[in-house]
Image (cartoon, rainbow, N blue to C red):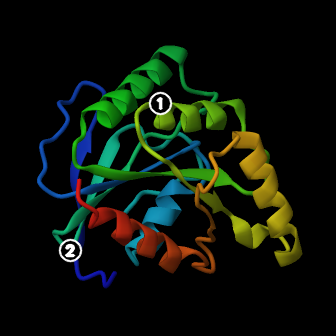
């Protein structure tokens, strides 16, 4: 994917109506501090279009990034952040559910998991929830640069077992620092985008 132009087109909060769009969507879900914004910036070749933050829980809206007027990269609110009130978490959950259930343009959901840690209960719930909504999530194992190369296969195996992934589920190790995995993610995204809906 050659990135010619990108823009943050739509921001959708808990009380917003979901936008009607013509372009296909690729969505990204993950825990609050898993590196979603860093991944989206890396995919778009931008340093800071998606706001990264030292304090997790920054993304409290669904953000729609228009890439080349050809597709939307959709950043879903991070989950599992302890300092957010339960009522707010439930609102975010309903917002994400509304999006997954009502967006006909959604072609794929990428679920980000920190490769250094076993999947949390929240990660497992999110994986099962995406599957329940009719999608085959693609797993992006983030922060792979923080491991020695020899440790990666063991951690990928633990991730697959921890999430009880369906056979054939793609797992892509990714680093926002080195851009490892970026091309693979785009290749997979493009193959899914141009499948018949």
Q: Mark 1 or 2, which is nearer the eye?
A: 1
In the image, taking residue 112 as reference, residue 119 lies left or right, namely right
Seen from the viewer's position, the closer of residues 99 and 188 is 188
| Residue farthest toward the top in the current orientation of the protein | 87
Q: Which mark is residue 170?
A: none
Q: Is residue 115 above or below residue 144?
A: above
At a point 56% along the width and 33% down the height, the residue shown is: 128
x then y, percent, for residue 167? 64, 51
Q: Which residue is mark 2?
A: 68
Earlier-in-chain disc, 1 versus 2: 2
x then y, percent, for residue 191? 36, 70
x then y, percent, for residue 137? 50, 48
Seen from the viewer's position, the closer of residues 46 and 113 is 113
Cα–Cα span, label 1 and label 2: 31 Å
At a point 31% along the width and 31% down the height, the residue shown is: 101
Q: In which quadrant of the rendered image does the N terminus lie?
A: bottom left
For mark 1, give the secondary structure. Answer: helix
Instruction: Decide: few, some or many residues near mark 1? Use Cα within 10 Å; few <14, some 14-19, many ≥20.
Output: few
In the image, taking residue 5 as reference, residue 61 lies left or right, namely right
At a point 62% along the width and 75% down the height, the residue shown is: 177
Seen from the viewer's position, the closer of residues 74 and 164 is 164
At a point 58% along the width and 74% down the height, the residue shown is: 181
Q: Which residue is mark 1?
A: 132
Q: Is residue 57 above or below residue 54?
A: above
Seen from the viewer's position, the closer of residues 49 and 5 is 5
Q: Is residue 197 above or below residue 61?
A: below
Asked where in the image residue 118 lies, by quadrant, the reply is top right
- Residue 181 in view, yes or no: yes
């Amino acid at each position: 994917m050659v990135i010619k132009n990108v823009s943050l087109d739509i921001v959708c909060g808990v009380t917003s109506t979901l936008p009607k769009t013509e372009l296909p969507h690729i969505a990204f879900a993950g825990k609050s501090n898993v590196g979603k914004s860093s991944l989206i910036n890396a995919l778009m070749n931008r340093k800071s279009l998606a706001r990264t933050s030292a304090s997790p829980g920054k993304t409290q809206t669904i953000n729609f990034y228009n890439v080349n007027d050809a597709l939307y990269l959709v950043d879903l609110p991070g989950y599992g952040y302890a300092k957010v009130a339960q009522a707010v978490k439930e609102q975010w959950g309903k917002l994400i559910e509304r999006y997954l259930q009502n967006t006909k343009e959604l072609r794929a959901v990428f679920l980000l998991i920190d490769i250094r840690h076993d999947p949390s209960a929240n990660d497992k719930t999110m994986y099962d929830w995406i599957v329940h909504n009719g999608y085959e999530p693609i797993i992006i194992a983030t922060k792979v640069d923080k491991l020695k190369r020899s440790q990666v296969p063991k951690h990928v195996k633990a991730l697959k077992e921890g999430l009880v992934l369906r056979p054939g589920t793609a797992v892509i190790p990714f680093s926002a620092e080195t851009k490892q995995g970026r091309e693979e993610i785009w290749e997979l995204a493009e193959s899914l985008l141009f499948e018949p809906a």
